[in-house]
Image (tube, rainbow, N blue to C red):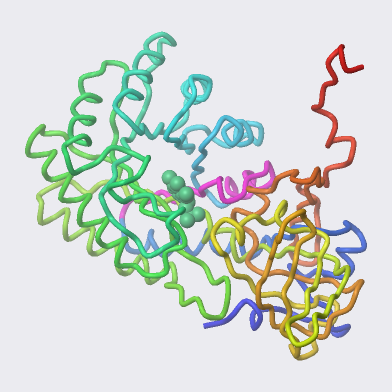
Amino acid sequence: MTTPNSMMIVNDAGHLVVGGCDVVELAAQFATPLYLYDETVIRRRCRDYVQAFAERYPSVEICYAGKAGLTTAIVRLMDQESMGLDVASAGELYTALQADFPPERIKLHGNYKSEQEMRMAIEAGVGRIVADSLPELDQLDALAGEMGATADILIRVRPGIDTHTHELIQTGQVDSKFGVGIYGGEAEQAVRRALELGNLRLHGLHCHIGSQLLELDSFERAVDLMIEFMADLHQQTGWECEDLDLGGGLGIRYTEHDEVPTVAEMARRLCPRLQQAVAAAGLPLPRLILEPGRSIVGEAGVTIYTVGVVKEIPDLRTYVSVDGGLSDNPRPALYDAVYEAVVANRADRPATEWVRVAGKHCETDTLIEEAHIQRVEAGDLLAVFATGAYNYAMASNYNRFTRPAVVLCGEGRAELIVRRETLEDIVSHDVIPEHLR
Ligand SMILES: Cc1ncc(COP(=O)(O)O)c(C=O)c1O
């Protein structure tokens, strides 16, 4: 197993290299804070999934969950890798369509889809709309009818699985806002309703049990419960499930302490289990859909900061302040997320200091509580690893910070895929009403 630090490449100048590019040069060219993506790593992760599952299961679609990080360039990349795309808002859907992603490979999610979002999806002819509730089925049917269309849908169910992950990213348990519960009969009721409605075509079932999952047991339980449910439904209604979407959730290595199953292990554990369970229940084999987000882009991302003040509190600790924080990475504050970092311009030196990395927002804003890094001083560059998922995607303008640029690096080429926001951007949506002029 490699750790984020041991995976890193350092050049003769002692500088960290991402996608064949010298990070010190990138910081000079694009300024900091700066999000970097290693294109080769993203493509490799897509291929890992496609290959590992295609080798073990006859019909598979791997959809990238755009919520982990979506830009028009990333959409193009996913299209080139023959991935499907999971979107969860009008903005994500619009991004996909603007980048000419084939609509038939798009899935629309959401526990509350606005009418605008449903209309957009039906009009675009997305491959699947993942219905999340009984009222939504009626709404979708009415809209599709009004638009003279038929909506191709899956139904999201709550299998009732408690996963070992942060409570904010657990989604498949009984007590969750997502989907319809298998227990209590709501999911069966939803399937029956969907089959009755004339403007819906029900293709299958969906579940997503949680995120940053570091063990495969929960996925196995999801397979078992979903097949059991499919068998019950088949017996009760005769309906055959054509698509089984098991969502995303595979974790990544944020630090050397995270032990993560490989995608190949996941495929080895899930595919035979699914095939055996389906055969035992006498059901036709469904197409298998997966929606990984974090495990596609997470480890491909590195965020570069410039170090400002280094403040030593005697006998206590050293605070290293960097030029970003909560606004470009809210995950430590939200989920107690832990990261590893290096001093990018001195990456060939041994890590000798334990420091706390602080962002510059108007609250505690701790990026890394205990970072083991090289000697550090003002003006150095700090690279924080595994920041490709839910970082740019969750970035905000808190304190009216401008959101950083995103650069895609590969084979020594560095290309801007999102330009840095400007101060003009910050006020561009503000309006001063007449009485305040
Ligand atoms: C429905 C759905 N699919 C896929 C994902 C992607 O999960 P992950 O990034 O953990 O792979 C999520 C994440 O919340 C989700 O809600």
Residue furthest out toward the left: 235
Q: Position of residue 102 (x, y in %)?
A: 54, 35
Q: What residue appears at the point 66 percent right and 78 percent down from the top-left corner?
A: 370
Q: Position of residue 207 (x, y in %)?
A: 33, 47
Stretch of the chain drawn in magenta: 58-80
Relative to 175, residue 145 above or below: above
Give the quadrant of residue 131.
Answer: top left
Q: Position of residue 136 (x, y in %)?
A: 36, 24
Relative to 217, residue 5 above or below: below
Q: What residue appears at the point 78 percent right and 65 percent down from the top-left corner?
A: 304
Give the quadrant of residue 305.
Answer: bottom right
Tell me: 142 left or right of 82: left
Is residue 292 at least partly visible in the picture?
A: no
Instruction: Compare residues 70 and 369 and report the one nearer the observer.
Output: 369
Tell me: 338 left or right of 323: left
Q: Is residue 206 magenta-colored? A: no
Tell me: 166 left or right of 200: right
Q: What residue appears at the point 73 percent right and 79 percent down from the top-left corner?
A: 355
Relative to 210, residue 356 above or below: below
Instruction: Compare residues 134 and 309 and report the one nearer the observer.
Output: 309
**Which quarter shows the C terminus?**
top right
Instruction: Compare residues 41 and 392 and report the one nearer the observer.
Output: 392
Q: What residue appears at the point 25 percent right and 18 percent down from the top-left corner?
A: 197
Q: Position of residue 21 (x, y in %)?
A: 81, 68
